[in-house]
Amino acid sequence: MTHPAYGVVRPVTAFASVLLEDNPGTMTLDGTNTWLLRAPGAAECVVVDPGHEDEPHLRRVLEAAGQVAAILITHHHDDHVQGAPWLARAANAPIRAFDPALCADEGPLRDGEVLTLAGLDLEVRHTPGHTADSICLAIAHENQTAVLTGDTVLGRGTTVIAPPDGHLGQYLDSLRLLAGSPPGTVVLPGHGPDLPDLPTTAAMYLAHREQRLDQIRAALTHLGPDATARQVVEVVYADVDQSLWEAAEWSVHAQLAYLRESA
């Protein structure tokens, strides 16, 4: 079974399976990946990013998960967290996230915290940039490592950074942190297919961002230092479908802020 596979549980590692929500779109790619985590033989399950309040999807999650130890959230966007309260009530499970406002019945996640749940140790890594509250979850189990990356690293394409919640400098630091993961660490993203090697992917993301920054520096040389994000988009993204320009403009705002902060 390969991605995308809607409405069915797709095993990815010995301890991680995914249920893809049928909510494709420009910002969600093929849809939201809801991750089900449990060690082989464990009775309980951890659910990560339930997705929208989409009852057919959430009922499938509940059926596949069985006894839910906790619901974890990678960041506050609706396509990851909106369905969490419904699932928490149905499963009688706590919700934990970096943002206290998203939590229910237990406190917020902390950077460096290790959660022992469903037979696994899950290390929380605060990875701001896409949003201020973005986290990743690192798992090492029986000689296999994986990181749930939320929207910090996607299965395809690049992540939108939209100020003021998004911040490019923080995002680059988060990518550098992830690039230091052990070789062969599997990427379990919030959207798109899983990937085989996080250090390689994070390094590619960093190289892409540096290339874009160079293109924006060149555009500013042509347009002038006070050019607007839209003017820069029309130059740098001239070869990109204009339906994507709005999302590109958000990222250019972040890039311009980063360059002007660094000047």
Image (spheres, helix red, strand yellow):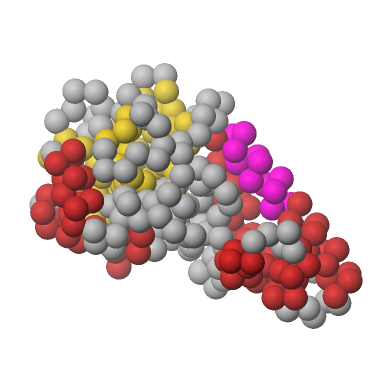
Quarter location, residue 67: top left
* Closer-to-camera residue (171/154): 154
Provide residue 78's location: percent of width, then percent of height: 35, 64
* Closer-to-camera residue (37/107): 37
Residue 92 in sight: yes
Provide residue 101's location: percent of width, then percent of height: 30, 68
Residue 71 located left or right of residue 234: left
**Magenta-colored segment: predominant secondary structure:** helix
Q: Residue at the top extreme?
A: 143
Residue 103 located left or right of residue 256: left
* Closer-to-camera residue (91/121): 91
* Closer-to-camera residue (58/132): 58
Give the magenta part as a residue range: 199-210
Residue 262 located left or right of residue 73: right
Image height of 94 relative to 132, above or below: above
Image height of 253 relative to 240, above or below: below
